[in-house]
Amino acid sequence: MPEKRIVPFLLLLLLSCPICAKSIKCVDSKGVTHYGDTIPPECANRSIVELDDKGLPVKENPATMTPEERRAMEEEVRKEAGEAQQELELKRRDKALLGTYTNETEIDMAKSRNLQQLNLALANVEAKLKTAKEKLSQDNAQAESFPRRNQPVPADLQARIQSSKKEVADLEVERVQKEQDLAAMTQKFDADKARYRELTQKKPAQ
């Protein structure tokens, strides 16, 4: 594609982006313009132009850059690209937060509903775990009685004990996960409430 068609198209993309990261531009030996956050092989030993967030040139780096200078410039461009993406994500989350709640009370109510569901799920896991442990304890007690009578532990009892051990272990893992979910949910709603208060410039109640 000729350069005169490439440049307007890419500039249109840059100008239409709500938050565009800093990028670089170079023209290779064939006259083809390249854009991005890294220097392509085609632009080796060619001058590099740094563009601002609107696609306008802000700095031109000579073709005689050392490898260290080129790497430093690419790293700066990638860093600013990451920062721009984080800013875009923060604005998206802020918009969603303000569009979801009209006051802090609604955040507290949503937090209460979600925590209630997680607490019920945790209680269910803990009940299953208690039952599984009791069953394992009974099977172990039964298995211990056989050696005292100089009898081998039946194979089906041994299999049942192994199955119970696995069930207990799995439920222990699930309980820890539910507890972590509770902590994460609490932290999320607390952070949302603090951010909502910050966005709406409200002060904590005295």
Image: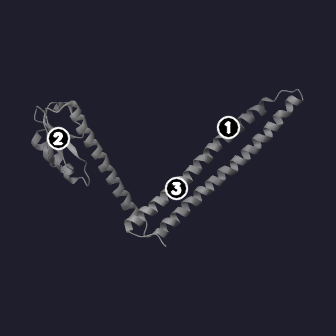
Occupied quadrant, residue 79: top left
Residue 25 numbered mark, or none:
2
Q: Image point 43% across, 66% down: which residue?
A: 101
Residue position marked by numbered label 1 in the rendering: 166
Q: Along the polypeptide, which appears first: circle 3 or circle 2? A: 2
Q: Position of residue 80 (x, y in %)?
A: 27, 46
Number of numbered discs present?
3
Amino acid of disc 1? Lys
3 vs 1, front mark? 3
Identify the residue at image location x=15%, y=47%. 58
Give the structural element (helix, strand or loop) at label 3.
helix
First in residue order: circle 1 vs circle 2: 2
Q: Quadrant of the N terminus?
A: top left
Q: What residue type is disc 2 on? A: Lys
Q: Residue at x 83, y 36 (%)?
A: 142
The kind of residue tagged 3 is Met
Residue 95 in sight from this viewpoint? yes
Q: Position of residue 138 (x, y in %)?
A: 80, 41
Q: Secondary structure at mark 2?
A: strand
Q: CA distance from mark 1 to mark 2?
A: 59 Å
| Residue at mark 3 to residue at mark 2: CA–CA distance | 44 Å
State the residue position of label 3.
185
**Residues tagged 3 and 2 counted as in contact (Cβ below 8 A):** no
Q: Specify whether 9 is left or right of 171.
A: left
Q: Residue 93: horizontal and vertical position, in percent?
A: 38, 57
